[in-house]
Amino acid sequence: MDIVLVILGLILIGGGIMTRRNPGMGWRINESWKTEDESEPSESYLELQRVRGFLAVVLGSIFIVIGLFMLLFL
């Protein structure tokens, strides 16, 4: 279970960093095909994605710390 937490933490951190750097990527993948014009995601959507990316990095860091603690001390 400990190594799984570390791997999951690394995946969450990677996804969170990608989301923080390019928050419109998810909109282009999931929503852009639904519109006929060349519309862009709203600022509130982009800000929410940045917050989600930050939370993913924090949660991934917590998973890594817990996983390493379990690996080293239990």
Image (cartoon, rainbow, N blue to C red):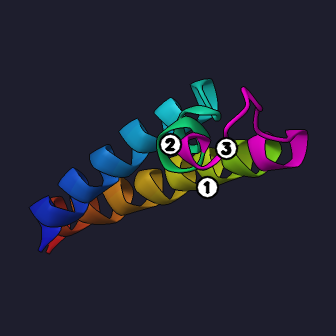
Residue with the mark numbered 3: 35
Q: Secondary structure at mark 1?
A: helix
As for residue 60 lying within the magenta part, the answer is no
Magenta region, residue range? 32-46
Answer with mark 3 or mark 1, whichever residue precedes in sequence. 3
Quadrant of the image occupied by residue 71: bottom left
**How dense is the environment of label 2, judged by Cα within 10 Å: few (below 14), some, or many (20 and up)?**
many
Measured as percent of width and height from the top left, residue 31 is found at 59, 49
**On screen, residue 23 above or below 1:** above
Q: Is residue 43 left or right of residue 5?
A: right
Foreground pick, 19 / 58:
19
Q: Is residue 66 left or right of residue 67?
A: right
| Residue type at tag 3 | Thr
Give the spatial CA distance, label 3 vs label 1: 29 Å
Quadrant of the image occupied by residue 24: top right
Give the spatial CA distance, label 2 vs label 3: 26 Å
Residue with the mark numbered 2: 16
Residue at the limit of the structure toward the right, as seen here: 43
Quadrant (top left, top right, bottom left, bottom right) of the C terminus: bottom left
**On screen, residue 31 above or below 39:** below
| Residue type at tag 2 | Gly
Answer with mark 2 or mark 3, whichever residue precedes in sequence. 2
Foreground pick, 52 / 29:
29
Q: Which disc number belongs to residue 38?
A: none
Foreground pick, 54 / 64:
54
| Residue type at tag 1 | Leu
Q: Secondary structure at mark 3?
A: loop
Residue with the mark numbered 1: 55
Residue displayed at 44% across by 51% down: 61
**How dense is the environment of label 3, judged by Cα within 10 Å: few (below 14), some, or many (20 and up)?**
few
